[in-house]
Image: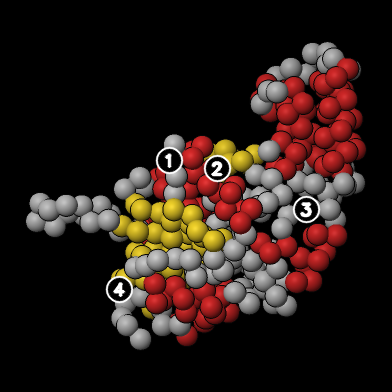
Amino acid sequence: MTVRAALAEGSGALEGSGSGSPFLDAALLLGHALGVDRDRVLASMPDELDASSVEAFRAFVARRSSGEPVAYIVGYKEFYGRRYTVDPRVLVPRPDTELLVEVALSLLPPVSRTGGGPVRTVRCHDAFTGSGCVGVTIAAERPDVEVSLSDASPAALEAARANALGLLGRPLDARLGDVLSAAVGPFDLIVANPPYVTRELTDRLLSTGDGEPRMALDGGELGLDIYPALAAQAFDLLADGGSLAVEIGEEQGPAVAAVLESAGFGGVRVHADLAGSDRVVSGGRHAVR
């Protein structure tokens, strides 16, 4: 069987499985079976495959057909130009979450010196860190910032710690705790990608064999259960002038903006992603309540 024939077979098998990109998925899975990247696969269409590679590829396609994310099968997901190790302990990083990183970077204060004295330490906390993709990316983009992580899942924290070491070459302070209970302020910035999927949609997603952790998805009946506690705790942990940025579902902008305003945040703003959907809400602490 040639590479071209394998891709045709694999993408055909994935057509009716709920995959939104059957050919891309097939190319990634074939690359994983061969130990090469997707571009190498696409450049090798006429090449013949050995029997063991075909067998491995078909096994991967079967797993994908059952609903398992490609990222879990290949063991990684690209995010903000870096490769994060992922498995069923953590949510698969989404491209939309890159907007949370961009907003966060825009809200961080620049490196500052006061009268030739020492550099002031800028501090950022990433709650609901999961794979660590948001906090680790911020630490990579702004090495001067002191970044800490937290999650309510011990297994997720293990994954985040491993990604920090692998991508930064150093550990980040990663603590177990619900919402912001493990965070030790004050912070200049708090970021969070909490569970915001409605319970009904979470049930549907998991019924397809998706395999992602429920606690990283299920935000309650309306997907909004976490935001009031998150906003209230963040306000108390932020330094005056600090900011909170949270990811949201595409129809949750007004509701989450109202939650931040009720918690005392000013300058609340809803940020849209490239598709024009609400994706991030941010606000600043400008005065003590």
Label 1 residue SS? loop
**Residue 272 seen:** no
**Left or right of 86 on screen, residue 189:** left
On the rendered image, what quadrant is the N terminus found in? top right
Q: Which residue is mark 3?
A: 211
Q: Which residue is mark 2?
A: 162
Amino acid type for the residue under numbered disc 1: Arg
Residue closer to the observer: 175 or 208: 175
Name the residue rendered at 62%, 59% in the picture. 153
Name the residue rendered at 31%, 81% in the picture. 287
As drawn, the label of residue 170 is 1
The residues tagged by marks 2 and 4 sit, at their Cα atoms, a distance apart of 33 Å
Figure quadrant of residue 125? bottom left
The x and y percentages for residue 284 are 38, 72
Q: Earlier in the sequence, mark 3 or mark 2?
A: 2
Q: Earlier in the sequence, mark 1 or mark 3?
A: 1
Q: Which residue is mark 4?
A: 240
Label 2 residue SS? helix
The x and y percentages for residue 188 are 34, 64
The x and y percentages for residue 23 are 79, 36
